[in-house]
Amino acid sequence: MTKNITNFKKILVPLDGSKYSERALSRACEVQKAFDSKIILLYVVEKSFPINLLDRKEYLEMLQKFGERTLKKANEMVLKKGITPKTLLKKGNIVTEIEKVAKNEKCDLIIVGNKGLGAVTRLLLGSVSNKLAQTSSCSLMIVK
């Protein structure tokens, strides 16, 4: 009797610019090679992040520019490995947007880093990987 092995046709890699999301991207490239998968790179601009230092518009513009740079860097890294990814930049709640993209793109696997950019962000937003582990509609790989 043989077991069915899941074929990961589409892999979603949410990025935040941290070394942990870079590790997740490296792992996604390994999985992509094993399954000849499509890779989708995603950066979500968190719109509800509370901040008083800058006005909201300026803050969101900074996040969007950071997201664009993060996606560009990740895209270049993946292209060097012979993989052509799809890149998406979304605005909204990070976990909600990741889940929407995973469903809309019919992803079989989400690969995410276990930590993000900093302790303050985790305290305010909660752990994205932890929330995804509770709510994801597809398989989830958390990379340390």
Image (tube, grey):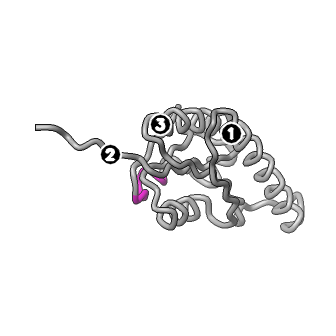
> Residue 31 — which label?
3
Q: For the N terminus, which image quadrant?
A: top left
- Please give left or right for residue 141 compared with residue 122 in the image: left
On residue 132, which mark appears?
Answer: none
> Which amino acid is tagged 1?
Leu
Marks 2/1 in contact by CB < 8 Å: the verdict is: no
The three-letter amino acid code for the residue at tag 3 is Val
Q: Which mark is residue 6?
A: 2
In-front residue for pair 75/82: 82
Q: Which residues are magenta?
A: 131-137
Element type at mark 1:
helix
Q: Position of residue 132 (x, y in %)?
A: 47, 53
Which disc number belongs to residue 79?
1
- Residue in the picture at 45% in, 62% down: 106
Instruction: Indicate the position of residue 87 as horizontal and vertical percent values.
Output: 67, 54
- In the image, 56: left or right of 3? right
Residue 108 is one of the magenta-drawn residues: no
**Amino acid type of the residue that numbered disc 2 sits on in the rendered structure:** Thr
At label 1, counting other C-alpha atoms closer than 10 Å, the crowd grade (few under 14, some 14-19, many 20 or more) is few
Task: Determine the residue positioned at 51% across, 35% down.
Answer: 143
Most distant residue in the left direction:
1
Magenta: main secondary structure equals: helix
Helix or strand or loop: what does disc 3 sit on?
helix
Q: Is residue 5 left or right of residue 97?
A: left
Looking at the rendered structure, the number of numbered marks drawn on it comes to 3
Query: Could you give the CA–CA distance between mark 3 and mark 2, rounded to whole angstroms?
Result: 12 Å
| Foreground of the two, 34 or 49 | 34
> Is-magenta flag for residue 132?
yes
Whole-percent x and y of residue 16? 68, 46
* Residue drawn at 76 percent across, 41 percent down: 73
Using the numbered discs, state the Cα–Cα distance from disc 2 to disc 1 in whole angstroms.
25 Å
